[in-house]
Image (cartoon, rainbow, N blue to C red):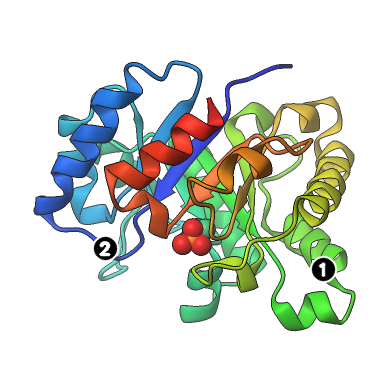
Amino acid sequence: MITRPYVVGNWKMNGTRSMLAEARAIDRAAERLIKVEVALAPPATLVHACRKEATLIGIGAQDCHPADGGAHTGDISAAMLKDAGAGFIIVGHSERRADHGESDALVKRKAEAALAAGMTVIVCVGETAAERDAGKAQAIVSKQLEGSLPASDSPAEQITVAYEPVWAIGTGNTATPADVGAMHGHIRAELERIYGEGGAQVRILYGGSVKPDNAAELLAVENVGGALVGGASLTAESFLGIIVAAA
Ligand code: PEP
């Protein structure tokens, strides 16, 4: 199956309405970049406004609560995010796992909530530097996949996995193409074990200090179906540099 590269910007806890101009500029350019599937995950406060500003690219959210609704002060359900205009949800980002102590089991419930709400989901996994140095990177990622992915009877084509080594996020240190190739091959094998033939349909994104000048090399690696981009997605100029490199 050949699909377009999927390039997703994660704005994290950045952005007020003044940043809508960036979303608009990315959207205008995306019209000309039909070879790439482009999406943005702004903070929840901007999902609705981004959806109105940007009509061509995907708009999603960075997290959701696993429940449909109820007494969960400060939380937002998948259905609420869908209602605001989100088409996908990122779950299990390493910053949420670290800042909020999110377990694999909780990430799985969130991923299943996103699918149940009729959205697609991006499930993030990745090892720390200490885990890699100890030779445990693949074992850690296997454990995260086993525990965080939606149930094996879920629609695999609605699921994307983002491999984001924790030591590469926001640090300027990217994994080498050889390391990315080895890990993405490992993730593909795990996906086929869990989802059977459907595992081949799951896109696997690389994330971790992707920039316009390293994107082409990383996206050319086998089993890399796109990129999850943090810092470099905050301006249209740098994000479009990555999108052009992906095309
Ligand atoms: C991310 O937060 O998902 C990420 C990959 O960040 P950065 O591109 O800044 O490393």
Determine crowd level at label 1: few under 14, some 14-19, many 20+ residues with C-alpha closer than 10 A: some
Residue 191 falls in which quadrant of the image?
Answer: top right
Residue 222 location, x and y as percent?
A: 79, 35
Residue at label 2? 14
**Disc 2 CB within 8 Å of nearest ligand 1 atom:** no
Task: Give the camera-side residue of 178 and 1.
Answer: 178
Q: Is residue 186 above or below residue 222?
A: below
Residue 149 location, x and y as percent?
A: 68, 50
Specify whether residue 48 is in view. Answer: no
Task: Give the camera-side residue of 81 and 22.
Answer: 22
Badge 2 marks a residue whose secondary structure is loop
Residue at (79% x, 33% y) in the render: 199
State the CA–CA distance, disc 1 to disc 2. 30 Å
Q: Position of 199 compared to 245: left or right?
A: right
Residue 200 falls in which quadrant of the image?
Answer: top right
Q: Is residue 107 above or below residue 155?
A: below
Q: Position of 64 compared to 160: left or right?
A: left
Determine crowd level at label 2: few under 14, some 14-19, many 20+ residues with C-alpha closer than 10 A: few
Residue at label 1? 137
| Amino acid bearing label 2 | Asn
Residue 94 falls in which quadrant of the image?
Answer: bottom right
Residue at (81% x, 56% y) in the render: 179
Res. 234 mark: none
| Amino acid bearing label 1 | Ala
